[in-house]
Image (cartoon, rainbow, N blue to C red):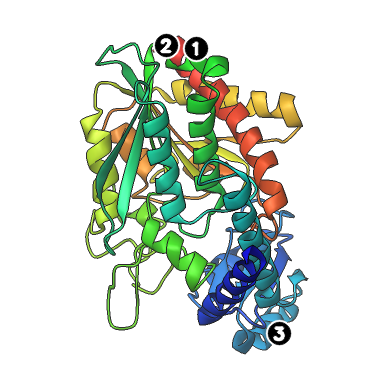
Amino acid sequence: MFLKTCLLLLVCSVAALSAHSYDGYKIYDIYARNNFEKQLLLRLANNVDYDFFDMPRALDVATRVMVQPKDQESFEELLRRFAVNFMVIDNNVGNTLQQEQLENQSQRLMAQRDTKRSISFTAFHRHDEINAYLDELAKAYPSRVTVKTAGKSYENRDLKTITISNGDGKSGKNVIFLDAGIHAREWIAPAAALYVIYQLVENFVANADLLKSYDWVILPVVNPDGYEYTHTSSRMWRKTRKPVSSACYGTDGNRNFDFHWGEVGASSFSCADTYKGKTAFSEPETQLVRDLLLSLQGRGKFYLTLHSYGNYLLYPWGWTSDLPADWRAHDEVAQAGAAAIKASTGTKYTVGSSTNVLYAAAGGSDDYAFGVAKFPVSVTMELPAGGTGFNPSTEQILPFVTETWTGIRAMAEKVIQKY
């Protein structure tokens, strides 16, 4: 009976993915050798028909882009015309995603059968499973864990936060606030947030020092509507799901915060992946993060938001190349995380301000947390690429999240020491 159920669910998962199958889509790595070629790629990135997974930064560092079948011939011809080097790294994204979907569904089913919790670190879990895990922890550890429904998404899903303490009953402690999943397709980010929760709650003895004078507040999925949409309909969807027009849905939540909103690095075109929204805080999900940040003002000492991909530890500002006066406080914390990861696994993270080491993008949650909510340290952590970027295999989940925890733990220790 269990086998029949598994097979039925696996078939259903493939059917669900067919809503946007990505059949015949290709992923390219493009190598700019000079500034002209870099500028050419930047201009191409403004075309919403091309999905640039990352933007051209340094020369000879590959820029990755996904192109649909109807545009591939003209896209390749343009690159050849200007003698730009490129390589196809995935000839059919649809086949790749279908195989990954089947594997993930199989792992989810095995986890449901073999583990006592709703989640594991061998699969990417659905939003209801994530919320169920939070509720299970609140029931199992009532003196140390509190779960609240902080609000609703546009499609009426519960956005739950988990507050983790050491159970000593003391109120008014300083707070580390962590969130993940503001961009829907970055599945490894919520998985990493869940691993942080697991370590702080279920591996409490080993991590008690992180909870002695601090509480942690964690929102593991900021954008549940988009996250669910990537599981059921369109794996590479990035934005929220609130309609903008009859043709276009969703806003880039990390361009929607009201701090230098829309000034740079965000699109006014509603179909673009970096659409800033009709107004700042147009999305219920970003309003909720705003309210959480402001409610912690004074107590909140460290804001950490998890993304993928790119091996970066970024801090303000995202709207200008100028650095805040106290940028060294951010840098010291981020460098501690990078050093811990390098020592543990050899993985190298690049550390610096968002604009200077990645690209300018105004309206981000990290700038808002620092500039408005007055968190003294605010960091965006871009986890490593898996698969072709946003699609790590199920086998990569545990290595990625354990490595990420190493960096987060080191950063938290530095914050606790400083504040």
Q: Report which quarter residue 370 is drawn in.
A: top left
| Quadrant location, the N terminus | bottom right
Observer-nearest of 202 and 59: 202
| Quadrant location, the C terminus | top left
The residue at the point 37 percent across, 47 percent down is 364
Q: Is residue 142 above or below residue 154?
A: above
Q: Report which quarter residue 213 is drawn in.
A: top left
Q: Secondary structure at mark 3?
A: helix
In the drawing, does residue 62 fall left or right of residue 250?
right
Q: Amino acid at mark 2?
A: Lys
Q: Amino acid at mark 3?
A: Glu
Residue 181 image offset from top left, x and y in percent: 45, 50
Residues marked 1 and 2 touching at CB (< 8 Å) = yes
The residue at the point 23 percent across, 59 percent down is 282
Which residue is identified by label 2? 212
Which residue is identified by label 3? 77
Which residue is identified by label 1? 209
The image's mark for residue 228 is none
Observer-nearest of 330 and 411: 411
